[in-house]
């Protein structure tokens, strides 16, 4: 196989994964974000990403056998689905809602930049880690990082059904000002 055929084969596989898992993950988020809330979506995303990463890592040799590659692609696709029905979508929504109005755009920008930096570190870090310590151990590290993300999710306030002022505490400040002036 020449380089062009290999690039085409990889691009085709990535496109199929995106169409079958990434895009539906966003659709499910859009459909359910106001029904079940940002917190639960992010928690479910990290939880299932952790499970699927461990399911890929622990029996990694099993997934490398020719008869099991379809199973690997399915597990990998489910990981992508829950990445997008979870942290990938909520990292855009939550920062836009939880910060006070005067800091909202700055804090959202910092959150977005941090997410992009984390994505770069993850992409390049996995590449170098896979070369240095192997794919199995690298997947285990990713599973552990997803688990940490799940734990950090417990620090995120739920904003479902609340106004931006209620979430940031500005409504309480306005009530206090009205009480003092009245």
Image (spheres, rainbow, N blue to C red):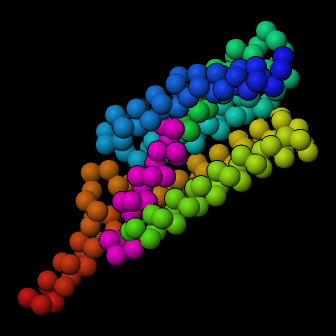
Identify which residue is drawn at 88% across, 38% down: 134
User: For this view, does 86 lie left or right of residue 168?
Assistant: right
Residue 19: x and y in percent read 52, 24
Residue 176: x and y in percent read 21, 82
Q: Is residue 51 above or below residue 125?
A: above
Which corner quadrant of the image does residue 171 belong to?
Answer: bottom left
Q: Is residue 56 above or below residue 71?
A: below
| Residue 8 seen anywhere in this rendered image of the structure | yes
Is residue 112 within the magenta segment?
no
User: For this view, does 55 lie left or right of residue 132?
Assistant: left
Identity of the residue furthest to the top in this view: 67
Q: Is residue 8 above or below residue 124?
A: above
Disc tally is 0
Identify which residue is drawn at 91% across, 45% down: 132
Query: Main SS type for the magenta part?
Result: helix
Identify which residue is drawn at 39% across, 74% down: 103
> In this view of the protein, which residue sits in the foreground, 107 or 35?
107
Residue 125: x and y in percent read 78, 50
Q: Which residues are magenta?
A: 84-103
The quarter of the picture where the N terminus appears is top right
User: For this view, does 179 lie left or right of residue 116?
Assistant: left
Is residue 92 within the magenta segment?
yes
| Residue 157 seen anywhere in this rendered image of the structure | no
Residue 44: x and y in percent read 51, 39
Identify which residue is drawn at 41% across, 47% down: 38
The quarter of the picture where the C terminus appears is bottom left
Which corner quadrant of the image does residue 105 belong to?
Answer: bottom left
Which corner quadrant of the image does residue 126 belong to?
Answer: top right
> In this view of the protein, which residue sits in the foreground, 41 or 96?
96
């Amino acid at each position: 196989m020449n380089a062009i055929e290999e690039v085409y084969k990889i691009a085709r596989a990535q496109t199929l994964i995106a169409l079958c898992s990434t895009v539906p993950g966003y659709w499910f988020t859009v459909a359910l974000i106001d029904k079940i809330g940002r917190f639960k979506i992010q928690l479910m995303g990290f939880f299932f990403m952790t499970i699927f990463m461990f399911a890929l890592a622990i029996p990694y040799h099993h997934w490398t056998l020719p008869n099991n590659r379809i199973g690997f692609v399915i597990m990998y696709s489910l990981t992508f689905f829950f990445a997008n029905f979870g942290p990938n979508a909520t990292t855009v929504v939550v920062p836009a809602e939880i910060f006070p109005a005067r800091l909202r755009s700055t804090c959202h920008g910092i959150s977005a930049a941090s997410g992009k930096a984390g994505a770069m570190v993850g992409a390049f870090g996995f590449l170098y880690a896979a070369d240095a310590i192997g794919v199995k151990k690298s997947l285990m590290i990713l599973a552990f990082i997803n688990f940490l993300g799940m734990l950090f999710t417990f620090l995120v306030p739920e904003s479902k059904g609340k106004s931006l002022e209620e979430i940031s505490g500005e409504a309480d400040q306005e009530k206090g000002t009205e009480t003092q002036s009245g």
